[in-house]
Image (cartoon, grey):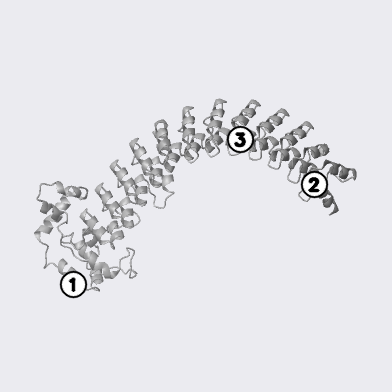
């Protein structure tokens, strides 16, 4: 305890800058190598507090380090004390002593942006390419703090412009990443590699695009930066610009980006723009002629539980009607995905999206990969949404398949069911949907299971009458079914072009007003 009190007394005198008191303490044989409670020797206190006169008295331990492995010189530079730093150097302090992070006084001088201290350190032989624990050189620090003057001093002293840190980041990469145009221009003029890549494969151009540094992108491209160098994830600068919706950068990159490289990446910029609802960027990409039917590679598709593949799917699952319309108008195929976009829209109850997809040829009778059955997949998601159901039936959904049961009047296998099945449909609601489906079929036979279900509800009486062979459909309805079948689902939307009376067209389109559910 006495030793610490002795050291603290010396530290207190130094902080006051009292040279006379310091000399008195030294004469009384107080040790100059005892540490204070802060872990510092007297020489550290003098350097850290800018007490030059006291420092001159204490230079006997000029390169001793404190408990944090900091020399007096490093402390003086850290605290921006030019006179103390110069004094230490003149008295023989080692300019290349480093702290625990292997940073030298020159690193710290660049960090505090003091060109005068940098000049003094260089004059006294500071190693200009010394790396810290993270691999940073003083030039990295100068670029990081946007000090072109210091960059120039370091380069003239022999700093290597292409040295990289442990992450593969060079000073030029750092300048592009931080948007430091002046430092970037300086480094390019002094031979820095414009196409250097970090350990993750990212280039300076990629980083500039990711951070929306438009002027940096222009400068790099003017120095022939390669827009076709992918990072380790296979992404190009165009991908990251499209993802973030940086339209101006996207426009600059399109002319210098190889379509082959885009295809080889396994993901189109259109996917990323659609996924992130970047509508304006999508317009730019479509106008440039990118393939709106580009599909994700299997490795990218597997990242999504639904195994989506097209830009259209992203637009639909986001509920973005404008993006979906842009893609469809540009020629997007609505039927490319395994789990088709129209099923997604129906499941979401998005009738406007469903109408749009059907208008552009979505197959309303598509099956569902996870449900191998003849029962229309569409009905599974819209049985509780009569307007949606009618819209699909109007557009060619095959209602007949709902009544085609291989068991017929025979006993059905025993199946454990709950009051509410996977469609979310209650037993009490069944007659309502069956009645609507019957409007779109001719004579059908109800299977034993459906009869059993309907017998539990009063609505069965009407359905029984409609399906009875004693009550056949009228000829007009049967003709309508035959005409619609001949026209085919994909051309039903063109019925209005037939040379027929308007009233008949309305009848063929189920728009005559005889249904309970109107869209």
Left or right position of 332 against 495: right
Front position in the image: 331 or 18: 18
Q: Nearer the viewer, mark 2 or mark 3?
A: 2
Q: Quick one: 355 or 48, which is closer to the camera?
A: 48
Residue 382 lies, in percent from the top left, at: 29, 60
Which quarter of the figure is the C terminus placed in? bottom left
Q: Residue at x 85, y 44 (%)?
A: 21
Which mark is first along the chain, 3 or 1?
A: 3
Label 2, label 3: how far apart the Cα atoms are: 35 Å
Q: Pointer 2: residues within 10 angstroms few (<14), some, or many (20+)?
A: many
Name the residue furthest right.
28
Label 1 vs label 3: CA separation? 85 Å
Q: Choose between 216 and 413: the one closer to the eye.
A: 216
The residue that label 3 is drawn on is 140
Disc 2, disc 3: CB below 8 Å?
Answer: no
Q: Is residue 268 visible?
A: no
Say left or right for 190 vs 351. Answer: right
How much space separates mark 2 and mark 1, taking CA atoms?
Answer: 103 Å
- Name the secondary structure under disc 3: helix
x 71%, y 31%: residue: 121
| Nearer to us: label 2 or label 1 | 2
Residue underneath mark 2 = 11
Q: Is 238 placed left or right of 498 in the picture?
A: right
User: Where is 476 relative to 253, above or below?
Assistant: below
Instruction: Give the number of the disc on residue 461.
Output: 1
């Amino acid at each position: 305890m006495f030793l610490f009190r002795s050291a603290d007394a010396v530290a207190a005198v130094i902080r006051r800058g009292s040279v006379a008191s310091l000399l008195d303490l030294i004469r009384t044989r107080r040790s100059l190598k005892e540490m204070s409670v802060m872990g510092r020797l007297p020489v550290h206190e003098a350097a850290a507090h800018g007490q030059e006169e006291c420092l001159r008295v204490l230079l006997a331990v000029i390169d001793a380090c404190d408990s944090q492995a900091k020399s007096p010189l490093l402390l003086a530079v850290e605290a921006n004390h030019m006179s103390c730093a110069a004094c230490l150097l003149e008295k023989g302090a080692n300019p290349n002593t480093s702290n625990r992070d292997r940073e030298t006084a020159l690193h710290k001088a660049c960090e505090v942006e003091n060109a005068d201290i940098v000049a003094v350190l260089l004059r006294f032989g500071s190693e200009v390419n010394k790396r810290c624990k993270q691999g940073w050189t003083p030039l990295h620090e100068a670029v990081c703090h946007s000090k072109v003057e210091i960059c120039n001093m370091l380069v003239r002293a022999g700093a290597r412009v292409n040295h990289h840190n442990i992450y593969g980041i060079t000073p030029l990469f750092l300048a592009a990443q931080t948007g430091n145009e002046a430092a970037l221009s300086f480094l390019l003029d002094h031979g820095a590699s414009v196409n250097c890549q970090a350990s993750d494969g990212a280039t300076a151009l990629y980083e500039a695009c990711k951070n929306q540094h438009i002027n940096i992108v222009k400068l790099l491209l003017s120095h022939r930066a390669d827009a076709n160098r992918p990072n380790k994830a296979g992404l190009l600068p165009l991908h990251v610009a499209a993802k973030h919706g940086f339209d101006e950068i996207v426009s600059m990159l399109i002319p210098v980006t190889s379509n082959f490289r885009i295809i080889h990446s396994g993901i189109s910029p259109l996917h990323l723009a659609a996924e992130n609802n970047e509508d304006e960027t999508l317009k730019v990409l479509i106008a440039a002629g990118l393939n709106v039917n580009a599909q994700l590679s299997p490795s990218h598709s597997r990242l999504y539980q639904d195994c989506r593949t097209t830009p259209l799917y992203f637009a639909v699952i986001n509920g973005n009607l404008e993006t979906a319309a842009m893609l469809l108008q540009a020629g997007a195929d609505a039927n490319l995905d395994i789990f088709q976009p129209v099923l997604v829209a129906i499941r979401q109850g998005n009738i406007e999206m469903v109408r749009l997809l059907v208008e552009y040829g979505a197959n309303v009778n598509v099956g569902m990969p996870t449900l191998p059955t003849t029962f229309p997949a569409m009905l599974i998601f819209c049985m509780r949404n009569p307007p949606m159901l009618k819209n699909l039936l109007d557009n060619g959904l095959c209602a007949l398949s709902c009544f085609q049961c291989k068991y017929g009047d025979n006993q059905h296998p025993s199946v454990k069911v709950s009051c509410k099945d996977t469609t979310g449909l209650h037993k009490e609601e069944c007659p309502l949907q069956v009645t609507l489906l019957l409007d779109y079929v001719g004579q059908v036979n109800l299977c034993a299971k459906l009869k059993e279900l309907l017998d539990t509800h009063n609505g069965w009486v009407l359905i029984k009458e409609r399906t009875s062979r004693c009550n056949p459909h009228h000829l007009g309805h049967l003709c309508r079914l035959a005409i619609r079948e001949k026209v085919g689902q994909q051309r039903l939307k063109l019925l209005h072009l037939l040379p027929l009376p308007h009233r008949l067209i309305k009848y063929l389109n189920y728009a005559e007003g005889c249904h309970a559910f109107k869209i």
